[in-house]
Image (cartoon, grey):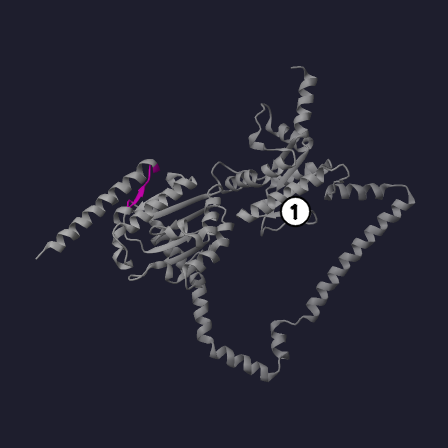
Amino acid sequence: MPADRNQRLSENQAEKACFVVSPIGEADSETRKRSDAVLMHIITPAAKEAGLTAIRADQLAAPGMITNQLITHILGDKMVVADLTDHNANVFYELALRHAFRKPVVLLILKDQRLPFDVHGIRTIHYDLSLDGVATAREEVKKQIITALADEYEVESPVTMAAQLDEISRSTKSESQVLFKTISDQLETTSKTVLELKDNLEKYVPRSLDMKEIIPPQIRDQISDTLRCYAEEIELLKSVRHAGVIGLHKRREVAVKAFARYIDEEPSEIMVVGSSLKGLLQKEEYRDIAAKLRFKQGLIKVKYLLTHPIVADFRASQENRRPTEIGLEIVKSLETLRDWGVDCSNVRLYLGTPTCFAIKTTRQMLINPYPYISVSFDSPCLVLEYSPESGAERPGYFFDEFNSRHFGAWDTDLAVHIQDYGKAIPFYYEKLNEYSEQVSSLIGEGKKMP
């Protein structure tokens, strides 16, 4: 193929390309999983709707030096979308290149992360990986791409603004010099104002000791009496919070709905533990939560530990359930997980009596302990939080205990791996049917006894 044709082809491709600048990370790392999710569910569909094709550095197939290819795409592609999450140095270097050549760029950052001062004034889309968050970010990225591609759009960045100021400062035209001096004076005035505000705050806002001195004695005594009256309650609240308890709910339905936001925010792994998980996977009142879990499995790992159908009847009598009823619910949940496309490796069956319903993210956990003589969904729930602190008096120990004693069952010999839904589901239906017939036969024989 002639060189000029190659060049035309490359230019045509660049006109349709949306290059993605983001932290990528090693394969299977949390950074890679998040980056893949953002690319797949936000940037790629947004670019497509704007008439462009998204491509990331690790998807470049052409031979040659990767650095040269990166620079070619950063400078030549029609659009660049940069994810500033985690303040990756390479991302900011590549962003600076794009800014230096005054090319359009759309910025993203994970919600709750702070923008560095250098780009604080640039419009940035704050995203999260929840169902609604992805849809909102995707639409905003599309709008910004379309706006930036318009003929009348003028690219502004810290680099171009600095260059313009430098050009004005070097200009020999009197009006340019006046404009530059005006801007400089305004910046200096703004800086002085900020410093004066800081000094005034330090001067006029009293310290805690000063505040105590200016409060009237009668009010001080009233505050002291109130603190003494509630001293025990305050200590109790402190100990509960130290244990890692951040929420209490009377019923599971309310607890699960409150926990939904932690499911939305989880960037790494979610695990669900329960008896049959019928409520979560099959009931209408949990439909929104089920949809979130199903959506999340396309972004991160979601694992399910259910009771083995063979031992499910251990709880049947205390819940006033018929023989095999819970076991059949478990198999039905397996069918649901199969239909969702959940990989078999993320589902296990526990050969033991279930003791709780629980959902765990990296930092939060919902626990619904099973009662002895009643159904579990009517019993109270706790919401717990993980603490990164260490030491003998480490806070958040409830999370640690429940994590090791309940979720730890996943890694024991009692947790049976499912190899194939197609074989497992019919097998369990058959065994439960045989068991039901045997129980019915025994009951019939019992009725004949003198």
User: Is residue 327 among the parts visible in the rendering?
Assistant: yes
Q: Secondary structure at mark 1?
A: strand
Queried whether the magenta region covers residue 419, the answer comes back as yes
Q: Looking at the image, is 294 positioned above or below residue 403?
A: above
Q: On screen, 241 above or below 5?
A: below
- The magenta stretch spans residue 404: no
The quarter of the rendered structure image containing the N terminus is top right
**Quadrant into which the C terminus falls:** bottom left
Side of 75 relative to 286 (left or right): right
Q: Nearer the viewer, residue 361 or 189?
A: 361
Q: Is residue 135 above or below residue 446?
A: above
Q: Residues within 10 Å of mark 1 (few under 14, many from 20)?
A: some
Q: Which residues are magenta?
A: 413-421
- Residue drawn 17% across the image and 53% down it: 443
Task: Indicate the position of residue 321 as horizontal and vertical percent values.
Answer: 28, 56
On the image, the x and y values in percent for residue 168 come to: 84, 43
Which residue is drawn at the image coordinates 29% and 62% (left, top)?
373
The amino acid pointed to by label 1 is Thr
Q: Residue at x 77, y 39 (%)?
A: 152
Quick one: 185 or 265, which is closer to the camera? 265
Image height of 266 relative to 99, above or below: below
User: Where is residue 310 drawn, in percent x and y?
Assistant: 26, 46
Please name whichever residue, 214 or 370, is drawn nearer the observer in this view of the structure.
370
Residue that lies at the very extreme toward the right in this rendered image: 174
Residue with the most extreme bottom position: 218
Q: Give the image location of residue 189, x and y in percent.
A: 80, 57
Q: Is residue 226 left or right of residue 439?
A: right
Q: Nearer the viewer, residue 160 or 324?
A: 324
Residue at which label 1 appears:
124
Measuring 62% from the left and 79% from the top, which residue is drawn there? Answer: 213
Residue at the left extreme, as displayed: 450
